[in-house]
Image (spheres, rainbow, N blue to C red):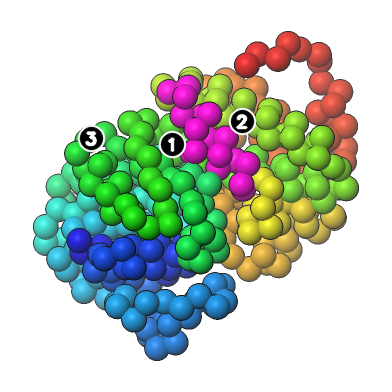
Amino acid sequence: MNITVLGSGTWGIALAKVLSENGSTVTVWSKFKEEAEKLAETREAPNLPGVRIPDSIIFTSDPAEAADNAEFLLNAVPSVYVRDTAALFSAHLKNKPVWVNASKGIESDTLMTLTEVIEDETVRNGAEMPVTVAISGPTHAEEVARDMPTLIVVAGDDPEITAAVQKLFEGSCIRPYTNTDKRGVQICGALKNVEALAVGIAKGLGYGDNTRAALITRGMEEIRRLGLAMGCRERTFFGLAGIGDLIVTATSNHSRNNRAGILIGQGVKPQDALRQIGMVVEGVNALPAAIRLCEKYRMDMPVISAVREVIQEGADPKGIVQNLMGRELKQENI
């Protein structure tokens, strides 16, 4: 298969490596010419030390070259750039490739999932409505790039195309499962990043495993309730895209959201924490959409609201935790 990966960050490179080693013809597009040239020359990604990029992978910054003959466009750019990327590529599509979204987020002004953003922007620019599939799950690029066993979920509306995307990963370090709840899978992928910030903040404050387990559990309950209000399927939230992804994002040192939260809990200002991480922290990008979804569906989501107070309003994290602990007593509605 001819696959073009859009985005040359750690996740894009990791997926490109897996797909290339699995027999596909892979092109990686970078927005930056110098970056594409350097990756092609060195065969090393700066944030994946010790990982050798296969010689068979082609790098380009030319969208026309990247789109040429692509059967699958695998989107791995940060969530805030998905619309611009879809607009750019919609002008260069000669056939009708399947768009596979591997990014995690929700567009803050429209509250669209990222596959909906791709569909909307492609049609807006005069191209045919694309077929879109979302992939998600507990997937740190640092481990995928090193061929560590990883499970993902492939979610789509068309069973045959969803199965075709699943097939792309067969025989690799990735074991893919299919799912028909495309919206639910993406809601989980976006909101778990916000919840992971909360877990990181608690760790930065010096709290232990009890607190972490409580925030993961209640955080997943928040996501589940919102997802059900949005028409998603309950089982999604207890699968790979839901609790699986939340666990890995909230507990791993690979997680930028977790690391950023730890710094904030230790007293580092949010913007300074982001600068120290040096890469995209998707939980911060997803926070405005998460808050708007809470308001739209009239959901009480205390953990996400607490993150908002800390990140957007500069509230004292320790005081916010005390407020959470002092909330009115309730039943556990799970």
Which disc, if any, is residue 185? 1
In the picture shown, does residue 330 fall above or below 170? above
3D distance between C-alphas at marks 2 and 1: 13 Å
Disc 3 marks a residue whose amino acid type is Pro
Q: Is 119 one of the magenta-colored residues?
A: no
**From the viewer's perspective, is 56 left or right of 38?**
left
Per the image, the residue denoted by label 3 is: 159
Label 1 residue SS: helix
User: Does the stretch in magenta take in 244?
Assistant: yes
Name which of mark 3 and mark 2 comes first in the sequence: 3
**Residue that badge 2 annotates:** 220
How far, Cα to Cα, is label 3 from label 2? 28 Å
Q: Quick one: SS at disc 2?
A: helix
Quarter of the image holding residue 309?
top right
Residue 216 in view: yes
Q: Which residue appears at 43% of the width and 23% of the height?
A: 233
Q: Amino acid at mark 1?
A: Val
Magenta stretch bounds: 233-249
Q: Quadrant of residue 316?
A: top right
Bin the neighbour count of mark 3 within 10 Å (Cα to Cα): few under 14, some 14-19, many 20 and up: few
Residue 288, image x, y percentages: 57, 42
Q: Which mark is residue 280?
A: none
Residue 218 position (above or below residue 274): above
The percent coordinates of residue 229 (x first, y second) are: 48, 20
Work out whether mark 1 precedes mark 3 in sequence or the reverse, and give the earlier one. 3
User: Which part of the image, by quadrant, shows the C terminus?
Assistant: top right
| Residue 329 location (% of width, % of height) | 81, 13
